[in-house]
C-alpha cells in the first residue's frame, strides 16, 4: 500500500496523483496494487463527502481521476489479443431529486 498515492488522491491533487501512478508503472509495479491504492483513496473521498468535508462534485472528480488511472494501468494487449468487456455499469438519480447531477 502506497500511502503517498492514497493521501495525494484523497486530497484531490489529481496531477500529483497521476505523476505518482506513472512513476510506479515505470518502476514495474503491479498495476493491480496501484488500482487497489487508488480505489482506497476514492473510498476516503466518499467518506469525506458523506461527512460534509467534500461535495458531490469532489466525489465525481475523484471518480474521473480513478478512470484515468485505470486506463493508465490497463495491461496492453499483445499478439492481437482482444480484451472483451463483460459488463456495462450505468447509474443515475431521480429527476428533480436532491442529487440531480444530470
Image (cartoon, rainbow, N blue to C red):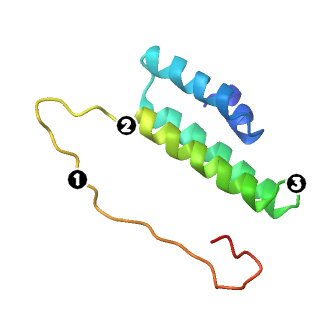
Q: Earlier in the sequence, mark 2 or mark 1?
A: 2
Judged from the image, the secondary structure of the residue bearing numbered disc 1 is: loop
Q: Residue at x 51, y 46 (%)?
A: 67
Q: Residue at x 43, y 39 (%)?
A: 71
Residue 74 disc label: 2
Residue 101 position within the rendered picture, expressed as x and y whole percent measured from the top left = 67, 70
Q: Quadrant of residue 81?
A: top left
Residue 53 disc label: 3
Query: Furthest-top residue in view?
Result: 27
Residue 58 position within the rendered picture, expressed as x and y whole percent measured from the top left = 74, 52
Determine crowd level at label 1: few under 14, some 14-19, many 20+ residues with C-alpha closer than 10 A: few
Determine crowd level at label 2: few under 14, some 14-19, many 20+ residues with C-alpha closer than 10 A: few
Judged from the image, the secondary structure of the residue bearing numbered disc 2 is: loop
Residue 84 disc label: 1
Question: Contact (CB < 8 A) between labels 2 and 1?
Answer: no
Q: Residue at x 73, y 57 (%)?
A: 57
Q: Earlier in the sequence, mark 3 or mark 2?
A: 3
Please say if 95 is above or below 11. below
Amino acid at each position: 500500500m502506497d500511502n503517498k498515492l492514497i493521501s495525494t488522491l484523497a486530497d484531490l491533487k489529481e496531477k500529483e496523483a497521476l505523476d505518482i501512478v506513472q512513476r510506479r508503472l515505470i518502476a514495474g509495479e503491479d498495476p493491480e496494487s496501484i488500482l487497489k491504492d487508488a480505489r482506497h483513496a476514492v473510498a476516503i473521498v466518499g467518506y469525506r463527502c458523506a461527512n460534509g468535508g467534500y461535495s458531490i462534485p469532489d466525489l465525481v472528480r475523484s471518480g474521473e481521476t480513478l478512470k484515468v488511472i485505470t486506463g493508465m494501468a490497463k495491461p496492453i494487449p499483445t499478439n492481437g489479443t482482444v480484451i472483451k468487456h463483460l459488463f456495462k455499469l450505468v447509474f443515475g438519480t431521480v429527476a428533480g431529486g436532491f442529487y440531480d447531477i444530470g
